[in-house]
Image: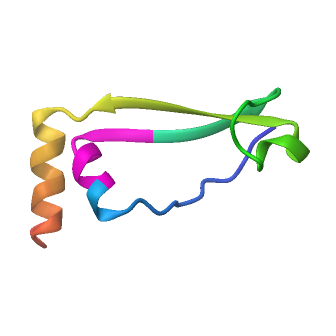
Amino acid sequence: MHLPVARFYMGRAQFELWRQTQLSIDAAPGRGVGSSLEAPSGLRFFTRSRVFSAEELAALEAAERGGA
């Protein structure tokens, strides 16, 4: 089953804690344990993350400044 990509909201304070991390929220068949969205869908949510490389961080910072 292929699910579409969707954007999600993260508050400014939380973003500041995660800004150096690529964060992916995904879904897979099975029962979840924490979200009311999981129960009727037959899917569970999980997250994956990795720290951006120095080059990726530089590109992101340039994009934030409007330079990319």
Is residue 54 rendered to the left or right of residue 40? left
What residue is at 12 percent from the left and 57 percent from the top? 61
Instruction: Give the quadrant of residue 35.
Output: top right
Foreground residue among 52 and 39: 39
The image quarter containing residue 30 is top right
5 w.r.t. 50: above or below: below
Q: Position of residue 29 (x, y in %)?
A: 81, 29
Classify the position of the N terminus by image quarter: top right
Rendering coords of residue 34 (x, y %): 69, 37
Residue at x 73%, y 47% (from the top left corner): 3
Type of colouring: rainbow
Lateral position of residue 27 relative to residue 12, left or right: right
Compared to 26, does 65 lie above or below? below
- Indicate whether 31 appears above or below 11: above
Magenta range is 14-23
Relative depth, front residue between 67 and 41: 41
Taking the spot 90% from the left edge, 46% from the top edge, the residue there is: 40
Count of numbered tags: 0
Residue 20 image position (x, y, % from top left): 21, 41
Q: In the picture, which quadrant includes the C terminus?
A: bottom left
**19 drawn magenta:** yes
Residue visible at 77% across and 48% down? 36
Q: Is residue 62 magenta?
A: no
The percent position of residue 7, horizontal first and vertical second, equals 53, 61
